[in-house]
Image: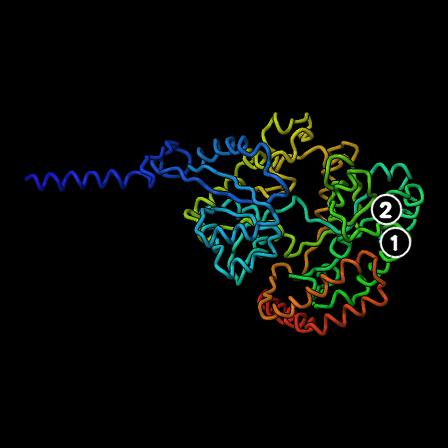
């Protein structure tokens, strides 16, 4: 009898231990009836990592607390945000995966550099079934945009996206443009910048008139379909013919134009070693114009110095358009269902989406009478300027986005509608290049472009001599093999789309 009682006591203790957490304490369970989960289920803590420039946001914990008031009620989960330095992002995620460190949701930036790599190495998991069960609001919002985040037909990430597709062009200092009565509506090509840069340089000799970095990416209209070693002209709108960008007339003309500006002194001789970004230089009053992705707001980034944004090429949807910001669920995630539930809630709950984007109402931003918001006191203090949270087309509109329209929100909305209607789509939209068959050639070609293109596209090298030299070296390194492989994969992909 004593033995029976002893065994019974041991059994009771075992049940009690199993019911406790691993650290020996009972966790508080949610009693909410409307969170869509078992009311007696233990609340789960999600680790959400995303890249940042510089230090972690100063008010992160304060906003995190507000976020958890919503997530605990709706999905019985808490969120712990873990900002990661963008320069160390890939290594941080890889180390966490190899060591088994807790990871539930990670942002890849730029996503197109890591999507196929992380999927191929099993660092991130397919999301199709999870999305079907837990992501109906995400699915309702995105539709065929998901094609940009698929690898071998399986969905591996959820894109974060700007409210509109960006165009290609440049931005210029508003104050300088007004000082010299520059009519931005007459600028249609790079050639139209000639008299403007000449005037600014003559009147402001100590000011850098143009910063050249990013000319090929921001002021030319190619669909790079994975990398610059084989591209589609005119954003891929016309056909699926893969060509060598460095041999196109568009590239040659742009490089020659920048060379002219460099020789005339419009570009600093030290541009290649400049540590500040164009935005920082412009905000500091040291720069007039620079290449940039454009949008209908008529302003670039930054709050200190208003900027006119000039579009040279209309917006084109490409696969990479929706691969810049990618939310992925690590394979090691303990509760991938909760990861998708959280992302879905951000799409479903606009209060949560605005909280994540702009911070706390009344503290990080103030609402205006016209329904827009003033973010002058808090933008950047929590997350960043990136649009990575939920359905971005439904977010609150910061008043700075329509300053270029004289503060008229209706004119801004009209311009946005016209912009959306003018947006086209590349014929290669949804195609993702598998670089594995030519990774050796890509590495060799990358070494060549790293050596020459910054100086060539910045005007420091003679295009007549160096474009030819670069192309010779690229072909010797296997460029044609890369182009042929891209064309082969693209042709096979296109057949399956019919």
Residue plotted at (52% across, 34% down): 64
Q: In this rendered view, identify the residue nearer to me: 131 or 218.
A: 218
- Residue 8 at x, y = what percent? 14, 40
Q: Residues within 10 Å of mark 1 (few under 14, many from 20)?
A: many
- Residue 294 at x, y = what percent? 74, 47
- Residue 22 at x, y = what percent? 33, 41
Residue plotted at (22% across, 41% down): 14
Q: Are marks 2 and 1 in contact (CB under 8 Å)?
A: yes
The C terminus, quarter of image: bottom right
The N terminus, quarter of image: top left
Residue 254 against residue 50 in the figure, above or below: below
Say what secondary structure mark 2 lies in.
strand
Kindly identify which numbered label has been placed on residue 261. Answer: 1
Kindly identify which numbered label has been placed on residue 209. Answer: 2
Q: In this rendered view, identify the residue nearer to me: 256 or 239.
A: 256
Residue 380 against residue 483 in the figure, above or below: above
């Amino acid at each position: 009898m004593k033995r029976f009682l002893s065994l019974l006591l041991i059994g009771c203790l075992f049940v009690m231990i199993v019911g406790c957490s691993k650290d020996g304490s009972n966790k508080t369970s949610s009693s909410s009836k409307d969170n869509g989960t078992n009311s007696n289920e233990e609340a789960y803590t999600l680790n959400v990592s995303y890249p940042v420039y510089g230090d972690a946001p100063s008010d992160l914990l304060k906003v995190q607390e507000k976020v958890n008031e919503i997530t605990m009620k709706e999905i019985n989960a808490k969120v712990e945000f873990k900002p990661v330095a963008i320069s160390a992002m890939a290594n941080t995620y890889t180390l966490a995966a190899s060591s088994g460190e807790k990871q539930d949701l990670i942002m890849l930036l730029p996503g197109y550099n890591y999507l196929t790599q992380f999927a191929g190495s099993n660092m991130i998991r397919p999301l199709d079934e999870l999305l079907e069960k837990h992501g109906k609001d995400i699915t309702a919002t995105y539709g065929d945009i998901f094609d940009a985040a698929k690898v071998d037909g399986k969905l591996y990430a959820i894109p974060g996206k700007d409210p509109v597709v960006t165009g290609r062009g440049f931005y210029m200092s508003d104050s300088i443009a007004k000082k010299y009565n520059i009519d931005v509506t007459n600028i249609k090509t790079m050639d139209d910048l000639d008299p403007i840069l000449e005037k600014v340089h003559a009147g402001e000799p100590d000011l850098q008139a143009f910063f050249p970095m990013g000319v090929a990416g921001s002021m030319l209209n190619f669909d790079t379909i994975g990398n610059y070693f084989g591209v589609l002209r005119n954003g891929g709108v016309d056909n699926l013919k893969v060509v060598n960008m460095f041999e196109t007339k568009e590239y040659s003309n742009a490089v020659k134009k920048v060379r002219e500006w460099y020789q005339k002194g419009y570009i600093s001789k030290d541009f290649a070693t400049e540590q500040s970004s164009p935005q920082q230089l412009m905000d500091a009053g040291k720069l007039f114009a620079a290449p940039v992705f454009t949008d209908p707001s008529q302003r670039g980034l930054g709050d200190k110095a208003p900027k006119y944004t000039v579009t040279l090429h209309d917006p084109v949807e490409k696969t990479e358009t929706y691969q810049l910001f990618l939310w992925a669920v690590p394979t090691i995630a303990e509760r991938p269902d909760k990861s998708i539930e959280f992302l879905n809630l951000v799409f479903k709950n606009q209060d949560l989406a605005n909280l994540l984007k702009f911070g706390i109402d009344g503290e990080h931003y103030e609402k205006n009478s016209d329904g827009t918001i003033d973010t002058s006191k808090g933008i950047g203090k929590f997350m960043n300027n990136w649009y990575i949270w939920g359905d971005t087309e439904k977010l609150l509109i910061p008043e700075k986005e329509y300053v270029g329209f004289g503060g008229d929100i209706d004119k801004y909305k009209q311009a946005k509608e016209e912009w959306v209607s003018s947006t086209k789509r590349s014929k290669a939209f949804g195609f993702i290049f598998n670089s594995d068959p030519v990774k050796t050639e890509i590495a060799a070609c990358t070494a060549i472009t790293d050596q020459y293109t910054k100086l060539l596209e910045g005007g420091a090298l003679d295009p007549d001599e160096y474009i030819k030299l670069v192309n010779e070296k690229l072909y010797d390194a296997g460029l044609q093999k890369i182009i042929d492989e891209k064309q082969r994969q693209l042709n096979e992909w296109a057949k399956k789309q019919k």
